[in-house]
Amino acid sequence: MGIRLFGNSCGRAYEYSQDNNVLVATDPDPAKFRIQDIEQVGVFVVAIVHYPNCTNYGGDKVLVWKNTKVSRIKAMKLIDPHFLETDRNLIARFRPTTEGWAEAIAYAKFRSI
């Protein structure tokens, strides 16, 4: 268990670990992830991606990409849940809850009309 101390403009969060008295980054490591669920909705892909080193929401992220296919997302070696110039297809992120998943699917369906 840690205490959040500060973040920077890139959204990187750090925690002070009470167990070993060091600062540790809590950002998701884009190379360490597991796709837990994924669905194609028209030109959108909605996925729940788990990052084992991330501390908020148990490491889960609900992500939405536009103009892509499930096969492309499954083949990715890096998935960064932040909105970066390197992945312009990532367009939305929702709370990683049952309600958030439903909202992401509804968003993709609405935008596919």
Image: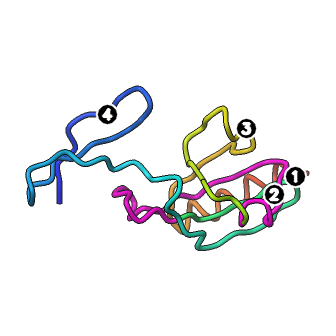
Q: Which of the two discs, 2 and 3, labels the residue nearer the N terminus?
A: 3
Nearest-to-viewer mark from 4 and 2: 4
Q: Amino acid at mark 4?
A: Gly
Q: Which mark is residue 88?
A: 3
Task: Judge by depth and name the residue closer to the eye, 36 or 97.
Answer: 36
Q: Amino acid at mark 2?
A: Lys
Task: Judge by depth and name the residue closer to the eye, 46 or 95.
Answer: 46
Residue found at the very far right of the displayed protein: 113
Nearest-to-viewer mark from 3 and 1: 3
Q: Amino acid at mark 1?
A: Ser
Q: Position of residue 21 (x, y in %)?
A: 8, 50
**How many angstroms separate mark 2 from mark 1 (CA)?**
5 Å
- Crowding at label 2, few (<14), some or many (≥20) Cα neighbours within 10 Å? some
* Residues rendered magenta in the picture: 50-74
- Crowding at label 4, few (<14), some or many (≥20) Cα neighbours within 10 Å? few
Disc 2, SS: helix
Q: Which of the two discs, 4 and 2, labels the residue nearer the N terminus?
A: 4
- CB-based contact (under 8 Å), mark 2 and mark 1: yes
Q: Which residue matches tag 2? A: 109
**How many angstroms separate mark 2 from mark 3 (CA)?**
20 Å
Nearest-to-viewer mark from 1 and 4: 4
Q: What quarter of the picture does the N terminus occupy?
A: bottom left
Q: Which residue matches tag 4? A: 7
Residue found at the very far bottom of the displayed protein: 36
Question: How is the rendered protein coloured?
Answer: rainbow
Disc 1, SS: loop
Q: Which of the two discs, 3 and 4, labels the residue nearer the N terminus?
A: 4
Query: Does 74 sit above or below residue 110?
Result: below
